[in-house]
Amino acid sequence: MQQRAMADKAIEQATSVGWRMNRRDIRFVILKWFRELTLIPVIVVLMIAGAIVNPVFFTPSNLINVAEGGAALGMVVVAESLILLTGKFDISLQGTFGLAPLLGAWLIAPKASQGLGTEWNPWLGLLVVLGVGLAVGAFNGILVVKANFNAFIFTLAMSILLTGLQLGWLGGQTVYNLPQAFIYLGSESWVGIPVAVWITVVAFAAAALFLRYHRAGRAMYAIGGNLEAARAAGIQVDRIRIGVFMVASVLAAVGGLMQAGRVTAVTAGQGSNLIFGVFAAAVIGGISLDGGRGRMVGALTGVVLLSLVTNILTLTNISSTWIDAVDGAIILIALGLAKLIGTERA
Amino acid sequence: MGEADHVFKSFGETRALVDVSLDVRAAECHALVGRNGAGKSTLVSLFTGLGRPDRGAIQLAGEATPSLADRGAWLARVACVYQRSMMVPSLTVAENVFLNRRMAGEGALINWRQLRSEAHALMLEWGFDLDVDQEAATLTVEQRQIVEIARALSIGARFLILDEPTAALEKAAVDRLFERVRRLREGGVGVLYISHHLEEIYEICDRVSVLRDGEMVLSGPVSNIRQAELVAAMVGTAPPRRATEIEAVETHGALGETRLQVRDLTVYSRSGSVAGVSLSVRSGECAGLVGLRGSGSATVADAVVGLVRPRSGTILINGSAVEPGQVHSTLHRGVGYVPQDRHARGFAPQLGVDENLTLALLDRLSRRLGIVSYRERTATARRQIEQLQIVARSLDQPVSSLSGGNQQKVVVGRALAPDPNVLVAVNPTVGVDVASKEALLDAIGRARDHGVAVLMVSDDFEDLRVCTRLLVMVRGRIAGEFKQPPWDRQRLIAAIEGFEVAV
């Protein structure tokens, strides 16, 4: 009897309220955006702190410097965020970040500046950079997705391998004296703003639009949210996940190219320890480590925050040997803040 | 050994047990039967100390029960062998038997030789043939049961509860299990035997008790109770509206061509293997595939949509064979799929209602370069929301925050949104309220009338009212067919339990 009464109540509710949908429940939309932009107040606070610490902070040249410093990191954050959304991750992006531009540079630079001496056409070198990214991504993707290797330990090993190759080939040296085409991304400016910054902003925007409007982008959220549900809905989950690994590695390779262009050389250490900042930026920005949750806007605020921190630390003239420790402490604080205000749910 | 004395137990509004009394004596095998939801698991949880009765008392070995927190005291009196494994897979049999226990004369360190020899002696004592050094992960279901029984006996429990022990066993293993149960009985152990297979009860049990809707409706020596009486007690007199027949709605659409064909399907699966099943479903028809859990009915559905790869056999959609084990290519051929477990496979919890409803037709919603048309997505989602009467705050409300009924509607809507030719639905109304159930079944009935070939796998008899034909599966094979609604509950249950081959 009780059950019957409950059922009647449910039916009554359904008919009286109706299943008409509120087109846009305004409050809900605001709430959703609020979650993505919770880092904005933190960033504002940091900027005020920066201004107090050193008047140089608010000069255009310093702000451009911040943006330029964050550009290469940003590319890798876009890459890692895409992979995180599908519920995997890739530590070896930092290896690709270093190795891909190194191989390109090695093939085009003359022997005198630590190149191989083949002195290939710079454009060919650029193709090599992208090709290395694509190949590493495909290898990681196939082995993690198809062969079901654990993403953490597999990409960690790959990262060690790639970084080791980089060190081995260079023997601790630096490839320099690179042609203009090769360093263009990291050294030129358009209307006063570095090309690298433009490209990174475009990458963020493209990724955001892709995730929102492309069927594969929507499928990525479904895969990260519930892999089996996505599979049962007929989504080609393996193909998409491998594709994401490949795209991400290419983005990391481009990020590495920016870095190389900025310092007009490829060092043996390029990329090492980068991945921790990448994860930190993505997670602080609301990208869930469990997959399926988070947006590019959030990840972008994460990158901005970390870049500001680095810049302010440099401006305070802290001894360079202490920068890493302070950096780590600040990432921890930012994570705590993100947890408090609810962007970090990993 | 174990006795329940007029126990009552409620969960919120649901009265799970009402004035139930049952006693299991030493050297007795006592069967407990009842349909799903009759209260068997609740009773087991009271006997094993996972819950306390609201009223009434449980006694073990003639004494009042220990406090719920004292797990050790419970384990020394009663043990339940569940269908799920309760062992540490990476340890050996001997280690599992003596897990977290200290043997006589042992200090903080483990005496490996003593551990092995005691485990071995235990196996010998009860006549179990098992290598105690074997790793638990490599054990078969049958061997795993042996270890769990041995473990319970070694702790000192003489009251064993076997929860559907034969569900995953082959015929020969079932016979060996019976042999072991008889030996336990001779050794003075009291066994509470829970099973859906009534013929087993007649083979090894002394007494039988039947639960229905939380009440003990029949109890007595097996020899005095005929099978028909047992079935009648389980089914009960249905409420007057439903009578003893399951009401069937009228069908409107005419039967069309064969849309789905399964030929000689053989699948190996832990959740129920399938051996040589053939069936076909025509447009405008709803074939119900019914069977106990583990009978393989759900496995047939999974194989049809490609979630499991069959060992042999072919599946044809609209007359042409599909690539086995490829979900996306099967679904793209016009198959809608409602998975068994909505949380595991039904939806992506954080995504919105609209997104989940349209997950299976992203391809069709996208325009040039794969850009998804949000306008069409909204329109499609609205259509399903209206058809299924989904109650949501907004189109993009996360499905995880919906009620169970509405979540299930989203899952069914996702399957129906692409206008499939074939709909494969497994337990499409599981765990939903009465109103949602009506809405879901109406939607499936409408799809059928519009010419969709529906294959419905369900263990809920109310779902069967939209079916036009029933196939009964028993132990991986199709054991009978009911061609004409309305369905006779008694005969249907008897067929499902494996008694009578209905034609």
Image (cartoon, coloured by chain):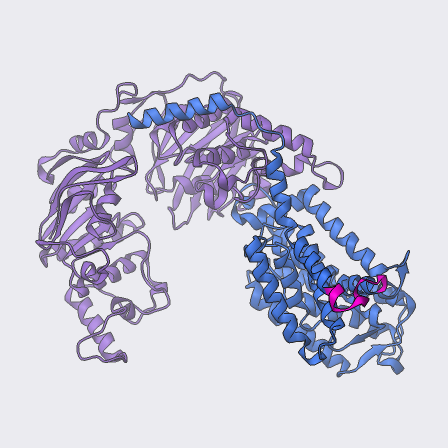
Residue B94 rendering spot, x and y as whole percentages: 27, 70
Q: In the rendered structure, does residue A52 fall within the stretch colored magenta?
A: yes
Query: Could you tell whether B178 is left or right of B495 in the image?
Result: left
Chain with purple colouring? B
Give chain A's shade.
Answer: blue
Above/below status of A122 relative to B500: below
The region drawn magenta spans A50-61
Above/below status of A319 relative to B14: below
Residue B415 rendering spot, x and y as whole percentages: 53, 34
Can see residue B495?
A: yes
**Residue at image location 37% in from the left, 67% down from the top:** B90
* B257 or B49, nearer to the observer: B49
Residue B85 rendering spot, x and y as whole percentages: 32, 57
Quarter of the image where the C terminus of chain A is located? bottom right
Query: Could you tell whether B109 is left or right of B206 in the image?
Result: right
**Residue at image location 46% in from the left, 35% down from the top:** B408
Q: Quadrant of residue B341?
A: top left
**Residue at image location 48% in from the left, 21% down from the top:** A16
Residue A8 rendering spot, x and y as whole percentages: 38, 23
